[in-house]
Amino acid sequence: MQTLDDEHPVLDLSVEECWALLRTQEFGRVAYRLVDEVHIVPINYLVDRGRLIVRTGSGNKLLAAALQSDAALEIDWVDDTNAWSVVVRGRFHRLSEDEQAEVDDSRLHSWVPTLKYEMLALLPAEVTGRRFLLQR
Amino acid sequence: MQTLDDEHPVLDLSVEECWALLRTQEFGRVAYRLVDEVHIVPINYLVDRGRLIVRTGSGNKLLAAALQSDAALEIDWVDDTNAWSVVVRGRFHRLSEDEQAEVDDSRLHSWVPTLKYEMLALLPAEVTGRRFLLQR
């Protein structure tokens, strides 16, 4: 990794670094488009064979998947001096029962015990990330 | 505040509770639509007279403001047993120089020292939030 300093306060992460960070986390935020509206919600996710798997009940995210709408998942981390963020942009695909059975969902935690019986995969079109040196 | 328990693992926050939480934070994520694309970026913000003020360089967020595109800012917090999130949906308005001068931007920190000479206000159309009891 390159070093951050005052002359280089922002560095782009490589795609490999982004995936490594995505695998260390299980909580992020998903933004998705629904016609002309933008929605953003916190969400648990799982990295599975190059896809990001999330659970959902019926509703807006399923509709966004049906409409093949653009979506993005973001994770970030901040401490007193450093921060990073990773963004995965792509589209949701609703998994069939057979596809759901192939996902090792023992690792897909759902922190909130509301009914979420559907599984979506965010199929990445673009994975980007940055590290920051903070001025506070 | 209502109490969260196993029978009530999710509670909606009042609009007043949402604003109180927004005022305690200065870091969130902004999602915005750019034609058919959805973008999401981490951002520093400031609550100013019912608006959320952010700084930006030239680029996508300014274009989204010019296009009057839908946008949303999200903040959240998670510990071992509890979480909350607040989402403000609305549209960006690019502040004129006079409007910028009226903002007490001594409280608008920019953690990353890249050039950000423009100021946008997210004008809220909808403010929602939830508290969660987590199952881990």
Image (tube, coloured by chain):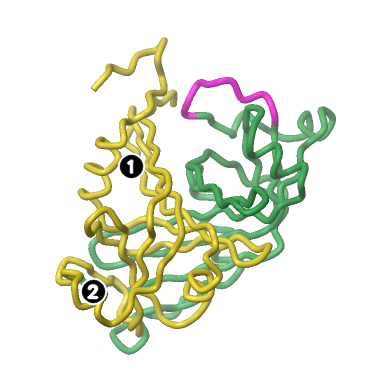
Chain colours: A green, B yellow
Magenta-drawn stretch, dominant element (helix, strand or loop): loop
Segment colored magenta: A111-118
Q: Which residue is mark 1?
A: B77
**Label 1: chain letter:** B
Three-letter amino acid code of the residue under disc 2: Gln
Q: What kind of element bears circle 2?
A: loop
Three-letter amino acid code of the residue under disc 1: Trp
Does the magenta portion include B23? no
**Label 2: chain letter:** A
Query: Alpha carbon of mark 2 to alpha carbon of mark 1: how far?
Result: 22 Å
The residue depicted at 65 percent of the width and 41 percent of the height is: A53
The residue depicted at 66 percent of the width and 28 percent of the height is: A58
Q: Which residue is mark 2?
A: A135
Q: Give the quarter of the image for residue B81.
A: top left
The residue depicted at 27 percent of the width and 72 percent of the height is: B110
Quadrant of the frame with the N terminus of chain B: top left
Q: Name the foreground residue: A97 vs A16.
A: A97
Is B115 situated above or below B42?
A: below
The residue depicted at 72 percent of the width and 49 percent of the height is: A49
Residue A6, percent from left and from top = 28, 85
> Which residue in the rendered view is the most extreme toward the top?
B7
Residue B68, percent from left and from top = 52, 65
Q: Give the quarter of the image for residue B2.
A: top left
